[in-house]
Amino acid sequence: MSEFKKGIISSLKESARVLSATTRLAPVIEAAASDILKSYRNGGKILSFGNGGSSCDAQNLADELTGRYRRNRPPLAAIALTANQGDLTSIANDFGFEFVFERPLRALGRPGDVAVAISTSGNSKNVLNAAAAARAMGLRVIGLTGRTGGKLKTLCDHCVCIPSDSTARIQEAHITVIQIWCGILEDALFPDAPLAHG
């Protein structure tokens, strides 16, 4: 067996192990989905944010909700605070990078909305600032993190802490959780909407 093939098999097995271990987090994943569902039923929206790969996950969550996941249905209000380059660069330049999510969250968030804070370590300062602001403003805060949850865990109503120390494995599990949430939301809010694909 080649060296590359051994590494591939090892990575796939570790990824499967982490996802299997994440099944014990099903109650908190469900509780978070229930909060998001309640927000939508009451006219709220999702504000998601994170750095690097987590910023891509935040955008994927918003994409699946404003576009579609599996069903052809009306769009759901979701904003990835990572997506506006003008906001990010001007706030970082004028106030500091630690405020790039907090300021747009304060501008756009309303009580009853849900903030989805994504940080594999749970210790990203800009994510913590936005999560703290969300709590102060009356938003529900859902965390996607790993390891022990870091400081973010203490700011969340629900925190999905993936049981791994590997950033790659944590991010793989985060996207799985996001896809699960999207499926739950579509099935609950639009049960009669047709599937987009067979």
Image (cartoon, grey):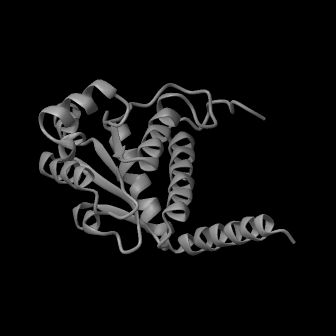
Q: Position of residue 149 (x, y in %)?
A: 34, 69
| Nearer to the camera, 187 or 18 | 18
- Dividing the picture into quadrants, the one containing residue 120 is bottom left
Q: Position of residue 187 (x, y in %)?
A: 57, 43
Left or right of 74, for residue 16: right
| Nearer to the camera, 183 or 146 | 146
Q: Position of residue 154 (x, y in %)?
A: 23, 67
Which image quarter holds the N terminus?
bottom right
Numbered disc total: 0
The outermost residue toward the front is: 3
Residue at 54% from the left image edge and 52% from the top image edge: 175
| Nearer to the camera, 39 or 18 | 18
Q: Position of residue 112 (x, y in %)?
A: 24, 42
| Nearer to the camera, 86 or 193 | 86
Whether residue 23 is situated above or below residue 85 in the rendered picture = below
Residue at 64% from the left image edge and 37% from the top image edge: 70
